[in-house]
Image: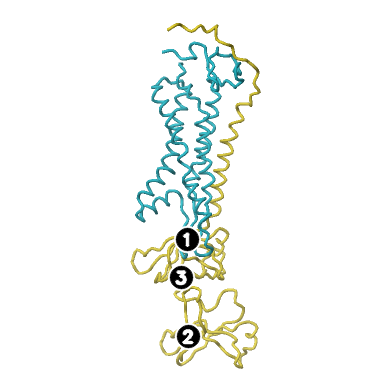
Chain colours: A yellow, B cyan
Amino acid sequence: MSEINVDELPAPNVHRHKRGRPAAIWIVPLIAIAAATALAVRTYLRAGPTIKIKFESAEGLTIGQSDVRYKNVPVGKITDIDISDDLDEIVVTAELNRGFAKLAVEDTKFWVERPRIGVGGVSGLGTLLNGAFIGVDVGASKKSADRFTGLEKPPGILRDQRGSAFRLIAQDGGSLAIKSPVYMRREQVGSISDIALAADGKSVEIEVFIDSPYDHVITDQ
Amino acid sequence: MKTAADLGVISCPLCELVMRSPDGDADCPRCGGFLPRVSRRGLTRCWALVIAAAALYVPANVLPMMNTEQFPIRRSDTILSGIKFLWSEGSWELAALVFAASILVPLTKLIVLGFLLVTSSRRSTWRPRVRTKLYRALEAIGHWSMLDVFVVSLLTAVVQLGRFASVEPGPAVLPFASVVVLTMLASASFDPRTIWVKS
């Protein structure tokens, strides 16, 4: 094998190549890091608060499917259902969407919305198809909270309902129930928001809620 | 063993003409093709692309890849949770396939590229043959990691049944595709000749 004579080889055409500044390539990782950070920040900001609500039963609730609704608008989703340490209750973990953190204040009420048929009519029919969801009624408090005890039945009065509440004491409850209508001249003016036996068991306390503007009609007489 | 660089010769990557090594940037006298020198510039380029890919690898795996709705269940899956789901549903082969294509391949690419870059940057003389083989393997597996992106884009187009079933791409698709493209560009800009440079 003969030794190659380097000098006999052709010479390349040397020229000043327009070289891009080698530093220019570092824009790529900079953009990548910026994009990754932006994605992380956006995800972090989008995640709302996580709250825990205690209920007696999880009937109809499904992880990842049932949502939390305020005035029928989905504001969050159930991420976990667990049983409390003493096995008495279930604990629902829900993640509220970003921007709805203000719903989770101390006296916010949560309840499970299921189909209900009563004297006051049929409610929650939509849940027959879509499954139960958790209803929310925001509280008046300014203090935020992340642990709640859920109500077993929907509250009779929602916070933003206008009107006045009255307490009646009766000998027996008849066949009245929550949401039973209250009539005046055969026109519905309100409904029963709560009904319960008095502590001493000798009477029944009925809480009625008269919607605005009919509540002005109620006088001492 | 002598390398071409030791002898002061270089060959044109296009027409394979052998010629003397130029001092600066040069063109081939026969075909006019650019003669890339065994230079650190390719290494810098490769470093930059690998770092960019590594940065995007995190959101690609943490964020959801695919949002599926199969009435009445809504799911939002990251790559890993999707694999877990497939596994728990009994589709082990599919889970293994997705794991290999979406986790193993990009991760191996990043690690191997990082290893080649570190050794080449330090002008290491450690087993150049093994490193060259690694480089070839890297080039070979490069195309096989876009699987997830294909799956998501196919499903998005096919499964659109309104309220009953729909598939939407998640925010991880873009970073994931970028990782694949960036690692491919990085391994292309890595000059395997730097493996053989003696210190």
Marker disc for residue A131: 3
Labels 2 and 3 positioned on one and the same chain: yes
Q: Nearer the viewer, residue A14 or B11?
A: B11
Q: Is residue B152 left or right of residue A189?
A: left
Of residue A207 and residue B183, the one placed in the foreground of this image is B183
Rendering coords of residue A167 (x, y %): 53, 85
Q: Find the distance from the CA under tag 3 to the CA under tag 1.
A: 13 Å
Q: Position of residue A85 (x, y in %)?
A: 34, 63
Amino acid tagged 1: Arg
- Residue B18: assigned label: none
Indicate the amino acid at tag 2: Ala
Say whether residue A51 is visible. no
Q: Which residue is mark 1?
A: B74
- Number of residues whose C-alpha sits closer than 10 Å to that of mark 1, classed few (under 14), some (14–19) or many (20 or more): some
Q: Chain of mark 2?
A: A
Question: Distance between the Cα atoms at labels 2 and 3?
Answer: 24 Å
Measured along the vertical axis of the image, is residue B169 above or below residue B113?
below
- Looking at numbered disc 3 in the image, what kind of residue is underneath it? Gly
Residue located 49% across and 41% down the image: B57
SS of the residue under disc 2: loop
Question: Which SS class for mark 3?
Answer: loop
Q: Residue at x 51, y 32 (%)?
A: B186
In the rendered view, tell whether residue B109 sits above or below residue A209: above
